[in-house]
Image (cartoon, rainbow, N blue to C red):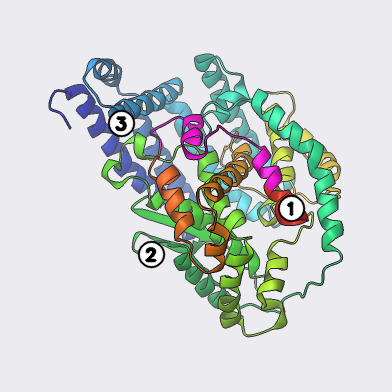
Amino acid sequence: MSTATPAYEALTSTWNRLHHLQHLQALAGWDHAANMPPKGNEARGAALAEMAALLHRMRTDTTLPGQLQRAEQETLDDLQRANLREMQRQWRLSNVLPESLVQRQQLARSRCEHAWRRQRPANDWAGYVANQQEVLALAREEAALLSAQTGLRKYDAMMDRFEPGMTCAQLDRVFGDVRQWLPGLIRQVMDKQSRETMIAPVGPFPQERQRALCEQVMALLGFDFQAGRLDVSTHPFCGGVPEDVRITTRFRDDDFLTSLMGTVHETGHGRYEQNLPRDLLGQPVAEARSMAVHESQSLSFEMQLGGHPGFVAQLAPLVARAFGEQPAFSAENLHRLITRVKPGCIRVDADEVTYPAHVILRYEIERPLIEGEIELEDVPALWDAKMMELLGIDSRGNYKDGPMQDVHWSAALFGYFPCYSLGAMYAAQWFASMRRALPDLDTRIAAGDLAPVFGWLRENVWQAASRWPTDELARRASGEPLNPAHFKAHLEARYLG
């Protein structure tokens, strides 16, 4: 970098330090979810709170405003300007929150998430609410501060942390449209599939073989095991840093597809992280663009590629080798299993047709929850009503598979859920663009050649990182900003074509 940019260089040095400390924070968080003995929770919570406070202190250091202002006047190239823009954004968001709030949030999240692991299997809604009340109160406090600083409505301000620029007004239009056509599409697909023969796999499926299968498929998808690993946690996730990506899954002896497809999903996240621009690591411009773009990568892997008959044909022999030959493991039958549409209670197990209903349900509850229009005591009845309306499922009294099923609310990730369906829409848009650029794409996937998919994603999404705002990234990659029509077209082509 130029020696004529002292303020900018000082900023890059600060953000490199932040990156190194966030690496340790991520590993402590991963260990908290995957390895830590139960009695370590209080000490780990305190340690994570201390780290959160330290990082917050660095982002709110009194020297930063002057450095940011002076860097604006320095001679920077376009990439450096983009990096400075992202630094300014992170600085603004951090300076809204007092350090005491950051610490209290970390402690409350650690306590609530740790207790949730026991409370969910016990269907203990009352116990969950006792801890969740504090998490919600602190989230509302954060939302009020962010709203006052940005001028956004409270939920928009919370969502902006994960998906910059997205608003409830946009979501209401997009999700309102999906609400119109989704129930009818679900009925049509289920009617069509009811006339198809499907053979159920015969278990049990030993967990050590499931793990080996998951790792084989991760390798097939290009995951770099020299820069990451697979472990087990209560709720699957992908964490860590680009140099050290930590993926987790969960296993059931009677079902191998949940862990397999969950791992495929997390591998999409992992490959995005592993392929962010290495020469800029540590700088915000080299971070993932947004959580909807991140979810577009996991869903490009799990749904677009994972449900592709050509890819399933590559999975079939691996599955048979893992668990022994049986009729259910033919490529055709395995594809029917993977693309089976059946409304269910659990979001992470949902097929790609019913999945948007799970996201819409959560959005329509957590938005008024953050904005103070409803309280936690109102959630079960709302959940039950929306589950029946959107998916025809009676969920009354089933808290563990209802409002307690996800870790997100315990972890105060309010505003994150919409990113899943936005990500599915972007994923469909990416593949539509791929097919225009590569007319033989489906033939190549069927032949076992996944390189065109990974090459397109690397060039258009992974290496772009945060160089451009999301709309600009989408235009450069696909010729247009988010267009949900591609998602509907994809579902109709795959499930009714």
Residue 302 in the image: state x and y as whole percent: 58, 57
Residue furthest out toward the front = 439
**Span highlighted in magenta in the image:** 466-489
Residue behind mark 1: 401
**Mark 1 Cα within 10 Å, few/some/many (few <14, many 20+)?**
some
Kindly identify the residue that appears in the image at 21 percent across and 22 percent down: 7
Whether residue 179 sits left or right of residue 210 in the image: it is right
Q: Is residue 277 magenta?
A: no
Choose top left, top right, bottom left or bottom right for residue 330. bottom right
Residue 450 in the image: state x and y as whole percent: 48, 62
Q: CA distance from mark 1 to mark 3?
A: 46 Å
Kindly identify the residue that appears in the image at 22 percent across and 18 percent down: 74
Residue 231 in the image: state x and y as whole percent: 48, 63
Q: Amino acid at mark 3?
A: Leu
Against 278, residue 376 (above or below) is: above
Q: CA distance from mark 3 to mark 2?
A: 30 Å
**Mark 3 Cα within 10 Å, few/some/many (few <14, many 20+)?**
few
Residue behind mark 3: 79
Q: Is residue 472 magenta?
A: yes
Q: CA distance from mark 1 to mark 2?
A: 33 Å
Q: Amino acid at mark 2?
A: Phe
Q: Looking at the image, is mark 1 or mark 2 earlier in the sequence?
A: 2
Against 105, residue 233 (above or below) is: below
Q: Looking at the image, is mark 3 or mark 2 earlier in the sequence?
A: 3
The mark closer to the camera, 1 or 3, is: 3
Report the number of numbered marks.
3
Whether residue 227 sits left or right of residue 298 in the image: it is left
Q: Looking at the image, is mark 1 or mark 3 earlier in the sequence?
A: 3
